[in-house]
Amino acid sequence: MSRRCPVIGLVGGIGAGKSFVASCFAELGCIVSDSDAGVRELLARPEVVAELTSWWGGRILREDGTLDRKVISGIVFADPEQRKRLEGLLHPMLKVRREETVRDAARSGCPAVILDAPLLLEAGLAAECDAIVFVDASREVRLARVAARGWDEAELDRRENAQKSLLDKRAASGYIVVNAGDAAQTRQQVARTLQHVLGSIAD
């Protein structure tokens, strides 16, 4: 019978660098369950495209018939009810993907599954985690990172206001990794954190 694979969830502010921290865990042999990648895959499914088009019309489609994620983001961030509607469609599908990832990880013998989900706490995914890591970076660092995406400070605030506060995220976490720009230091923190999490589970 396969052993159970620990699940470590990542939380933090937008632009804190959760994806980089996830990649550091991957370098240590962990398997990353990337919710953003999962959403992109789901939004490419014909049945999902058809459902969302029935809700919001052709304005959400590009010329090639694929979904325009920027338009969809504008809809769901402007209207909490529409956001809940979209989450109600996608979250059950994402849950199936996560469960498959955890089963595959257990069979492969990897140290842990890393759950990189932007709305981990908001979606109630903390219940699926054995540990939660808060990825920390200053507001100045985060602003510089999101500027590279073409976002200004107002856009960062708009998106963060749709999520739990940083205080709530930090309070829900048992571990902190500071990702301020020094990759080597971040990798060292990730390695120590993984050791501590696995040690606490073994105890």
Image (cartoon, helix red, strand yellow):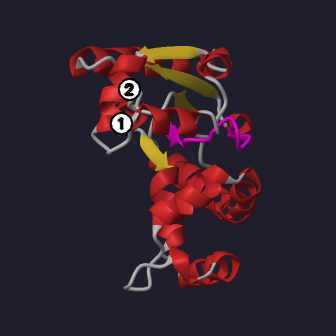
Res. 178 visible in picture: no
Q: Residue at x 43, y 44 (%)?
A: 31
Res. 202 visible in picture: yes
Instruction: Give the structural element (helix, strand or loop) at label 1.
Output: helix
Instruction: Give the structural element (helix, strand or loop) at label 2.
Output: helix
Amino acid type shown at disc 1: Val
Q: Position of residue 110 (x, y in %)?
A: 44, 41
Foreground residue, 199 or 94? Answer: 94
Residue under circle 1? 146
Residue 88's quadrant in the figure? bottom right
Mark-to-mark CA distance, 2 and 1: 6 Å
Q: Is residue 139 above or below residue 70?
A: above
Q: Is residue 40 left or right of residue 28?
A: right
Q: Is residue 122 magenta?
A: yes
Residue under circle 2? 142
Q: Is residue 110 left or right of residue 87?
A: left
Foreground residue, 198 or 139? Answer: 139
Asked if disc 2 and disc 1 are in contact, CB closer than 8 Å, the reply is: yes
Q: Residue at x 67, y 30 (%)?
A: 164
Foreground residue, 165 or 134? Answer: 165
Q: Is residue 182 left or right of residue 201?
A: left
Residue 124's quadrant in the figure? top right
Magenta residues (range): 112-125
Q: Is residue 163 above or below residue 97?
A: above
Q: Is residue 155 magenta?
A: no
Q: Position of residue 122 (x, y in %)?
A: 70, 39
Q: Position of residue 135 (x, y in %)?
A: 46, 23
Q: Is residue 79 left or right of residue 66?
A: right
